[in-house]
């Protein structure tokens, strides 16, 4: 991707957009958090990490992201990532010192609630996180 293409993708509206990289999803999320006046800190860092993990998992294990949504509630934000796979996420076992295998655990640890909805077109993984405004 050329830099001008990357710049155009970063300016694309969130509605209907499905970021196909963790970097793109984090950039969209930073803009969203800024727009909702979220206070920077551990909570926003946790949201960015969960976004990164969910998008990375969808790209690596489920054929890519088919939907991406961020919704704020009273003191919360819900991150939803859709993909075309009907297989629910599961923890990966890895040996100490080997990269990977920790993302699903991180999502569950950082989130107040995680839900997986499986439908005829794939699944949606939604994570509810605390967020101060």
Image (cartoon, rainbow, N blue to C red):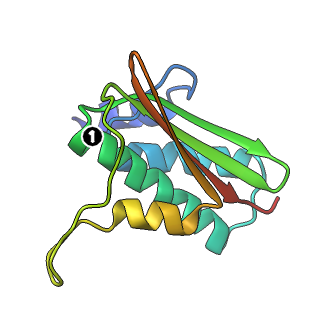
Q: Residue at x 14, y 76 (%)?
A: 98
Is 10 left, or right, of 84 in this rendering? Answer: right
For the N terminus, give its image quadrant: top left
For the C terminus, give its image quadrant: bottom right
Looking at the image, residue 86 lies above or below residue 53: above
Q: Residue furthest top?
A: 120
Q: Position of residue 85 (x, y in %)?
A: 30, 29
Q: Position of residue 9 (x, y in %)?
A: 41, 31
Of residue 96 and residue 65, the one placed in the foreground of this image is 96
Give the image quarter of residue 93. Answer: bottom left
Q: Residue at x 22, y 44 (%)?
A: 60
Q: Residue furthest bottom?
A: 96
Of residue 4 and residue 20, the one placed in the foreground of this image is 20
Give the image quarter of residue 45. Answer: bottom right
Q: Residue at x 40, y 15 (%)?
A: 120
Q: Residues within 10 Å of mark 1 (few under 14, many from 20)?
A: some
Give the image quarter of residue 40. Answer: bottom right
Q: Disc 1 designates what residue?
A: 59
**Count of numbered marks:** 1
Of residue 121 and residue 51, the one placed in the foreground of this image is 121
Of residue 86 and residue 24, the one placed in the foreground of this image is 86
Q: Position of residue 69 (x, y in %)?
A: 57, 34
């Amino acid at each position: 991707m050329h830099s001008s293409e990357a710049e155009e993708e970063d300016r694309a509206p969130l509605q209907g957009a499905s970021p196909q990289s963790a970097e793109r999803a984090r950039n969209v999320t930073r803009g969203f958090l800024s727009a909702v006046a979220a206070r920077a800190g551990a909570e926003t860092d946790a949201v960015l990490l969960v976004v990164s993990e969910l998008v990375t998992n969808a790209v690596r294990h489920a054929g890519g992201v088919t939907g991406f949504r961020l919704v704020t509630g009273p003191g919360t934000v819900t991150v939803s990532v859709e993909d075309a796979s009907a297989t629910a996420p599961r923890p990966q076992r890895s040996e100490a010192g080997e990269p990977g295998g920790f993302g699903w655990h991180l999502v569950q640890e950082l989130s107040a609630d995680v839900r997986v909805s499986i439908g005829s077109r794939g699944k949606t993984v939604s994570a509810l996180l605390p967020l101060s405004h």
